[in-house]
Amino acid sequence: MAHLIAPSILAADFANLQRDIEMINQSEADWFHIDVMDGVFVPNISFGMPVISAIKKHAKKTMDVHLMIVEPDKFIKEFKKVGADILTVHYEVCQNLHRTIQEIHNAEMKAGVSLNPHTPISVLEDVIQDLDLVLIMSVNPGFGGQNFIENTYKKIIQLRDLIDKSGSGAMIEVDGGVNDQNTPKLVAAGADVLVAGSFVFKSDDPVKTIKNLKL
Ligand code: DX5
Ligand code: ZN
């Protein structure tokens, strides 16, 4: 399967959100990547339900919601209500990860788990069969525009091996510092979905940049 591109709304112009959403609708992008930050799990606050509802009104593609928040279980149903199709929680904040995954599925969303750069792939061995997506952080979560961490390639290869051995259907998504230089290597290592924020929105021609990342 050809890899997918998920532009990160965090890098959009929030004063021109509708314009930027239409740009993604019209581009070859596959998903909207939506970063929710609580200022507790990560040292930054982004946006919450009202903004996601506003995005949903205009977005014509899959809503891929990445929660960088503690106690995500409290809000699962609400994220469904505001339009999430895929809900990804961080491994590092879930004390009952298996239950959280079940609850995301019960709310009729695809379930993802994200791993910080310091968290090994092996922690997913006993839940990989239940996952639709694993999001490997290739920067420390909290901010756009950071440098890609090279150790990510090794983790993608390990995760691809775990998925193949377990017969899981999970997709591998990579988030942080993605650009046209590392994209071919990420895809070769086994990534299915690439999140790109700054590289898309800070470029002169975002539609063309997205098209190039798909090649
Ligand atoms: C970081 C977020 C990313 C971020 C990526 O915590 O999860 O999705 O928007 O931005 P870039 O592509 O600029 O690294
Ligand atoms: Zn993200």
Image (cartoon, grey):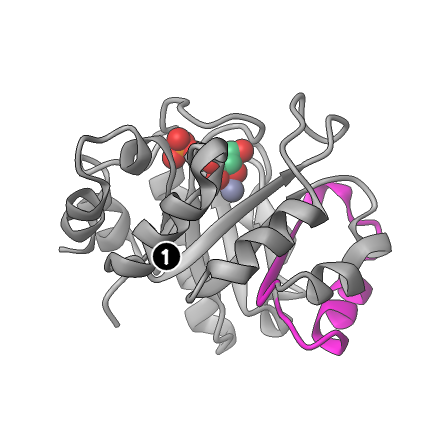
What residue is shown at x 38% (from left), y 37% (from top)?
197
User: Does mark 1's beta carbon lie closer than 8 Å to ligand 2?
Assistant: no
On the image, the x and y values in percent for residue 191 come to: 34, 55
Q: In this view, does 183 lie above or below 167?
A: above
| Residue depicted at x 67% and y 21% | 43
Give the image location of residue 42, x and y in percent: 67, 27
Q: Is 40 placed left or right of 210 in the picture?
A: right
Element marked by disc 1: strand
Residue 12 vs 184, above or below: the answer is: above
Q: How crowded is mark 1: few (under 14 residues within 10 Å), some or many (20 or more)?
A: many
Viewer-side residue, 1 vs 53? 53
Q: Is residue 4 one of those drawn in magenta? A: no
Q: In the picture, which quadrant includes the N terminus?
A: bottom left
Amino acid type of the residue tagged 1 in the rendering = Val
Counting from the top left corner in percent of width and height, residue 137 is at 49, 39
The residues colored magenta run 84-110
At 68% from the left and 77% from the top, the residue drawn is: 108
In the foreground, 28 or 118: 28
Q: In which quarter of the image is the C terminus?
A: bottom left
The answer to whether residue 92 is magenta is yes
Residue indicated by mark 1: 193
Question: 192 left or right of 122?
Answer: left
Residue at the (23%, 67%) spot, across then down? 2
Q: How many marks?
A: 1
Instruction: Say whether residue 35 is visible.
Output: yes
Nearest the viewer among 182 and 34 is 34
Residue 203 quadrant: top left
Q: Position of residue 11 (x, y in %)?
A: 43, 33
User: On the image, which quarter does residue 76 sit in?
Assistant: bottom right
Note whether residue 117 is visible.
no
